[in-house]
Image: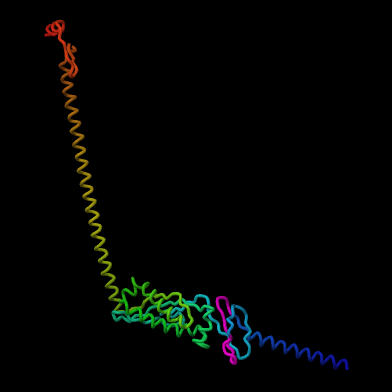
Amino acid sequence: MKQIKFKSFVRGALIFAVLGLFTFIFMWSRTKWIPAGNVGVIYDASEGLLPEVLKPQAVYVGWRRQLFIYPTKLMNALYTEDPTAGEDRSADGILVTTNDNANTTFDVSVIYRVLPENVIQVFNEFGAIPIVDVQTGYIRRATKEVANDISTQYDLFSLMGPKRLEASQKMTTLLRERMAQKGISVEIVMLGASYPSAEFQSKITSRVNSYIELEISRLKREIAEIERQVAIVKGEANNKAAQLSASQTKDRSIDLLKLQATEQALKKWDGKLPAISPKPGQNVIITSDILGQMGGRR
């Protein structure tokens, strides 16, 4: 009797262990992770969308339920002709038409995210479609429409160069308004590399060469003007130097003549001082003694 009870106990324990193992495996298989930078919502087949927005954590998803995850971190939806990058891993750049009738493909990058308070709205708009499919489908289509609305305001040369940033800002504003209606927050739209046709590439090259030649001509004129001004300054400096040199020579010549006159006077001097050496404006009284001396000298 005891042996039968022991066998029954062992059998029950094994059954319990197996059931526990299967339960653990089942619950583990139904456990999903919401990674950092994301939030999630659960859809129940009977109750519909549950109102709670789940933060990053491990979540048990019950029977007939499904977890949908949305990125609250910044996401980059890249539509590019590079087949090794982008969303579709194929050439999926955005084809636009400019006001000079040039059909040209551009790489376009859309930075977006879903704010936690907008998760329910996004689910109501797109239903059970995962956000990655929304990104490759709906966001791309909206981006293409916005890009073509803006591109017709520019010619291809401007859109590829000086007006690219301006066009990107306009696209950002327009796409932000359009996607806000779906609960998706667009941060910025950026036009990237362009892929013009061979015909337009030739026109662009010709236009760039003309612009470079124009700039070279302008620089040459500026250089010639600078050289002219330098020549004028040099001429004025040389003229001033010549005038200073002539003035100094004249002053030296006058000093030399004075020295020569003094030398001649010294040669003729007999070594006697004059009897009268009046100063300018001084009254001189001549006495008989002085007259005698003067007469004796004659």
In-image side of 207 versus 36 (left or right)? left
Where's residue 276, x and y in %?
Answer: 17, 12
Q: Which residue is drawn at 62% across and 80% down?
A: 58
| Quarter occupied by residue 158 | bottom left
| Residue 213 image offset from top left, x and y in percent | 25, 66
Residue 242 to residue 115: above or below: above
Vertical placement of 231 versus 244: above or below? Answer: below
> Where is residue 75 shown, x and y percent of the image?
49, 77
Dividing the picture into quadrants, the one containing residue 47 is: bottom right
Q: Which residue is drawn at 55% across and 78% down?
A: 38
Is 131 in front, or is 271?
131
Magenta span of residues: 34-50
Q: Locate residue 110: give its quadrant.
A: bottom left
Task: Tell me, yes or no, whether the highlighted magenta stretch contains residue 40.
Answer: yes
For the C terminus, the image quarter is top left
Does residue 284 appear to the left or right of 178 in the view shown?
Answer: left
Q: Where is residue 269 in the image (x, y as percent from the top left)?
A: 16, 15
Residue 290 is one of the magenta-drawn residues: no
**Split into 4 quadrants, where in the image is the N terminus?**
bottom right
- Image colouring: rainbow
The residue that appears at 15% across and 20% down in the rendered structure is 264
The answer to which of 72 and 284 lies nearer the viewer is 284
